[in-house]
Amino acid sequence: MQRELQHIVPGMATSDGAGVKIKRSLGQAPYARLDPFLMLDEFNSENANDYIAGFPAHPHRGFETVTYMLDGHMLHEDHMGNRGDLKTGGVQWMTAGRGIIHSEMPQQSEGRMRGFQLWLNLPAAEKMKPANYRDIDPSEIPVATLPGGGKAKVIAGSVTVDGNSITGPISGLSTDPQYWDVHLSADGVFEQPLPDSHNVFVYVYEGDIAIGERKLTHGNAGMLGKGDSIRVTAGKDGARLLVLAGIPIGEPIAQYGPFVMNTQEEIEQAINDYRAGRLAG
């Protein structure tokens, strides 16, 4: 059964960090989450004033952040002494776990800065595990060539083409995340099986698409209903979109800014740990 587009979350212009201009779809309000996904931001500007202030040192606890750069150069630094250059086409998959304090700062003063940051929740049993991160070079991300043209970059999970499975660099996580960047030409079609156990949403960042009888235009997220496959048709100008799927955790969510736990008491503990210098161990 093909999944249908059930709910559209229009992207909302806002800012984060030290004033970086972004468009937020998932995560703009509690009703706009889709378990296990908490938030999706798109940043896209050729005006350095929109991004140059970056994201100075700030804490996280209880979830994962996934940063995917389409264009530009960011430097990650954290309390563990890690440094990572995130450049065009690259991904950083960071597990905040029990706590991390990091910064993400632009390494350019002009030109286009474009990409996404996704927040992926962790189950209670994993929220206090040690922090970790992985920089993924563009060469590590396989590209599936789709029947009839088009392509899918497989960041996490796998895509099946002609019976062959193309698996991305991230796999084996408890929520089994699928993260695909799909490019379609005019009227192109992307069809793929997806387990009924997963929640699925798509985010269109160029062009527009149709899922069944409903259209989804760029800058908006679409939450899909139950089913065991997805079929997307691009509009007359083609489309580029993210397809994200994961197994829902089904646990209570308590969030305060950069902390995502299960109870208010755990949030208060995170705040106290941060103030006392204990957040990151």
Image (tube, rainbow, N blue to C red):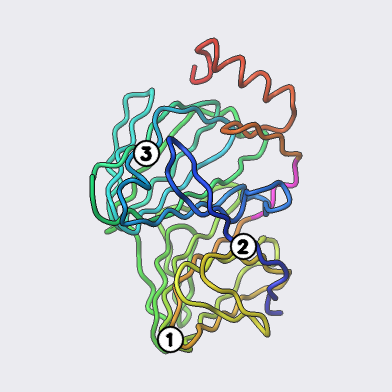
Mark 2 or 3, nearer chain start: 2
Residue 61 location, x and y as percent?
Answer: 56, 30
Residue 159 position, x and y percent, is 48, 70
Q: Which mark is residue 54?
A: 3
Q: Does residue 65 lie above or below 139 as drawn?
A: above
Eye-nearest disc, 1 or 2: 2
Task: Return the x and y of residue 165 as percentages of the image width and height.
Answer: 45, 71
Label number found at residue 10: 2
Name the residue located 61 percent from the left edge and 43 percent from the top edge: 121
Say the numbered circle drawn on residue 147: 1
Q: Is residue 25 magenta?
A: no
Magenta part, dominant SS: loop
Horizontal relation, residue 106 to residue 157: left or right: left
- Determine the secondary structure under disc 2: strand
Question: Could you say which quadrant of the image residue 196 lies in?
Answer: bottom right
- The amino acid type of the residue labelled 1 equals Pro
Segment colored magenta: 247-251
